[in-house]
Image: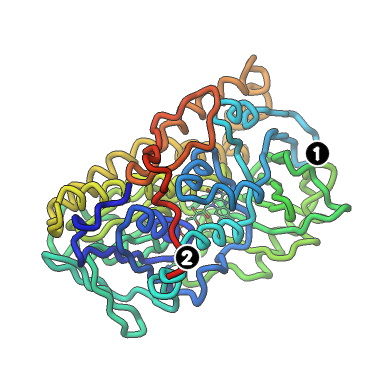
Amino acid sequence: MAIEQKTVPENFRVIIVGGGPVGLTTALALSKAGIDFVLLERRDNVLNPSIGAGVALWPHGIRFMSQLGLHDRLAPLGVAQRQITTQTLQGHMYGVHKTFAITEKKHGACLTMFHRAHIIEAIHSGFSAKEVRSQILTNKKLKSIDTTDTGVVVTCHDGSVYKGSIVIGADGVHSKTRQLMRSMALEHKSREVNPEKPFSVEYRLLWGTVPRTPALNLDKNNFYETHGKDASMQAISSNDFTYLFVYERIPPGGAKTKAVPYTDEEADAMAARWQHMAVGDITLGELYAQRSVAGLVDLDEGVVPHWSWGGRVVLVGDSCHKVTPNRGIGFNIGLGDVAVLVSEIHGVIANSMGGSPSSDDLQEAFVRYQAKRAKSVKTIAGICWDAIRQMSWKTTMDWLMDRYILAWIPGYDNILAYYLANLLRKEPVLDCVESEEYYTGTLPWANAFPVPRSGNLKGSLSDSE
Ligand SMILES: Cc1cc2nc3c(=O)[nH]c(=O)nc-3n(C[C@H](O)[C@H](O)[C@H](O)COP(=O)(O)OP(=O)(O)OC[C@H]3O[C@@H](n4cnc5c(N)ncnc54)[C@H](O)[C@@H]3O)c2cc1C
């Protein structure tokens, strides 16, 4: 259900800043909706992820990918995580949870682990050759944005200039787009000015990727968690790799700045600090010694108050909300942003009947977009932030809840699965892209896909251009 060609204003073009997972998905969703775009990425290749770890897709995330036509490509690559086991730092196992297996019955899809590069490649495979050649541009670092009554002019550090109708900032946690929006709001003496530093940091994360071998064969359908005072760990597998995530509470004043990131030596030192931490029958030290790649990052937390400016600039993904990765859902939240924002833009264009939508119409759409996302983003973010503190026993109550009380609650897995499934079933999809439904379970999705009318899916773009 793309926009009829005659109603698309010839010059309506979206400029996406950032070619990370959310930026690429935004581009693909716009393409499926029949809306012109150009994507500007500062790195020299969108296929090399900046983090070499795994990515979990939740049931609604997998479903959204299927709406973008990626079901057949992604389905064989993921590994369902049906069970969570929890143990202490010393290896005493005190929890076995079937929450994900229960939600799988409800949605027809499980929490599924992928190699990050495979997800990026899958999204990239959805573009036509022409789009890859001329609309996904690398070595393009955003420098400035000028807005006019009818559009935007974007300038990159290499001096190149791009004209479009709106800018979507998908440029991550240190978003330059967000900084420029703030300057514009200050310049116009607006009351909608974001804080200069909208996120806070309390934990750091050592991540690593370990090739799976017969000697290192943690059960790939089991989500291993290790909980303890001030530190916790997760080990999760895809088909070929086990991904380790070690979380550590940062002592006051110990957080890094964007300009001075952690070194490899600091990553190794953190691994050494927690080398005896148990994971299954082995230790972090044994796992880390087999890594192919690893890194240390601070974990920003927060939701930006204002996601758009003047009907011409709008944010998606990590640029406007940052959750800790312990629930594997940051990218999945970004997918919900893409679904709502692209549907809203599609609606505004369709209503403009061939004319260019005004800044006021676009700003109203952006305000609706944020209003539709805000509640769910804050709820899911809160789950992540509470969980990282509980896993790392921040308070005595966190320790008591995690170590003893939750295990004693009869039917706890069912209660949690019920809560999560009812939250996730409401996550949005595109209202303007037809798709068949691949995932159904005992709990119906709140938002149905537009059903193909002719059997000729808009999603099946020709690659022959
Ligand atoms: C170790 C780890 C594991 C994670 N695991 C999961 C998981 O299992 N499931 C999940 O859902 N989420 C997970 N997350 C979170 C997820 O990675 C993020 O939510 C997701 O990457 C956000 O995507 P994004 O495109 O918004 O931002 P980013 O991934 O940060 O991408 C931003 C892009 O913008 C580009 N850019 C930045 N500035 C400019 C500029 N000035 N001009 C042009 N381009 C620019 C960057 O180069 C980058 O390509 C994890 C995060 C980490 C750190």
- Mark 1 crowdedness (10 Å alpha carbons): few <14, some 14-19, many ≥20: some
User: In front of the other: label 2 or label 1?
Assistant: 2
Of all residues, the one furthest to the top in this rendering is 410
Q: Residue at x 28, y 45 (%)?
A: 369
Which label was assigned to residue 226?
none
**Coordinates of residue 237 in the picture (x, y in percent):** 71, 48
Q: CA distance from mark 2 to mark 1?
A: 52 Å
Amino acid identity at mark 2: Asp
Residue 98 appears left or right of 350: right
Residue 270 appears left or right of 455: right
List the residue tagged with mark 2: 463
Q: Residue at x 37, y 46 (%)?
A: 433
Tell me where residue 450 sits by quadrant.
top left
List the residue tagged with mark 1: 91
**Coordinates of residue 158 in the picture (x, y in percent):** 36, 84
Of label 2 and label 1, which has the lower sequence position? 1
The relative height of residue 266 versus residue 409 in the rendered view (above or below) is: below
